[in-house]
Image (cartoon, rainbow, N blue to C red):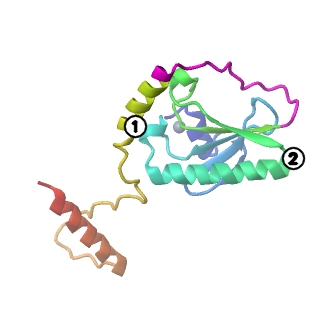
């Protein structure tokens, strides 16, 4: 983590200026981007891959991505944005820290994200549909908020608890019930 440019940026140890920051997410201008105004949006926590991010943080990350994209339209008169993630080394991910790229687009900007369309056979499509439906059927509920942290038992002293702590206790009790 020590030499991660994103983590170091979060801590203010790089020259990258934060153009947006909240409790979980930071956005900076890419110093070597595809075009001027290429923005990087990333979580403050060092998540190496997308898959390990909690749902609620992914939700927030993309809320921010959308707002920054809107800001890019306004600030630098983009006519469109490409929003790209390189998820995994095979997809071109170079650094082990989740990042979303926002690339402002203008007509005739010379960027090329085109690929040659490949005609799939009906069998190929059907086979993938089948496998994907099966895998997607295992998607359960989305995690909406942080898991409540376990209450630490410290010594014998009775600690005073604020009202909302009691709610946590109830949740703890529910969690305990699930343990076989
Ligand atoms: Zn990092």
From this view, report whether residue 61 is shown above or below residue 167.
above
Secondary structure mostly seen in magenta is loop
The residue depicted at 32 percent of the width and 60 percent of the height is 149
The residue depicted at 73 percent of the width and 36 percent of the height is 30
Q: Position of residue 21 (x, y in %)?
A: 64, 54
Q: Are marks 2 and 1 in contact (CB under 8 Å)?
A: no
Is residue 123 located in the magenta-colored stretch of the structure? yes
The mark closer to the camera, 2 or 1, is 1
Quarter-wise, where is residue 93 in the image? top right
Q: First in sequence, mark 2 or 1: give its number.
A: 2
From this view, report whether residue 100 is shown above or below residue 22.
above
| Left or right, 173 with reference to 113 | left
From this view, report whether residue 167 is shown above or below residue 77.
below
The residue depicted at 48 percent of the width and 38 percent of the height is 50
| Left or right, 125 with reference to 175 | right
Mark 2 = which residue? 77
Q: Position of residue 66 (x, y in %)?
A: 67, 51
Front-most of residues 54 and 31: 54
Front-most of residues 107 and 166: 107
What span is colored magenta in the figure?
106-124
């Amino acid at each position: 983590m020590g030499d991660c440019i994103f983590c170091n940026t979060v801590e203010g140890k790089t020259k990258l200026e934060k153009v947006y920051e909240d409790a979980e997410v930071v956005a900076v201008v890419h110093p070597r981007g595809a075009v001027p105004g290429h923005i990087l949006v990333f979580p403050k926590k060092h998540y190496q891959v997308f898959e390990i991010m909690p749902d609620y943080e992914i939700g927030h990350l993309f809320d921010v991505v959308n707002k920054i994209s809107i800001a890019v339209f306004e600030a630098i008169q983009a006519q469109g944005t490409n929003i790209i993630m390189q998820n995994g080394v095979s997809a071109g991910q170079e650094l082990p820290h989740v990042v979303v790229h926002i690339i402002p687009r203008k007509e005739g900007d010379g960027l090329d994200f085109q690929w040659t369309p490949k005609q799939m056979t009906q069998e190929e499509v059907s086979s993938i549909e089948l496998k994907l439906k099966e895998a997607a059927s295992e998607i359960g509920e989305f995690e909406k908020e942080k898991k409540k942290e376990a209450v630490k038992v410290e010594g014998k002293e009775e600690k005073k608890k604020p009202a909302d702590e009691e709610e946590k206790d109830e949740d703890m009790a529910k969690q305990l019930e699930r343990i076989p």
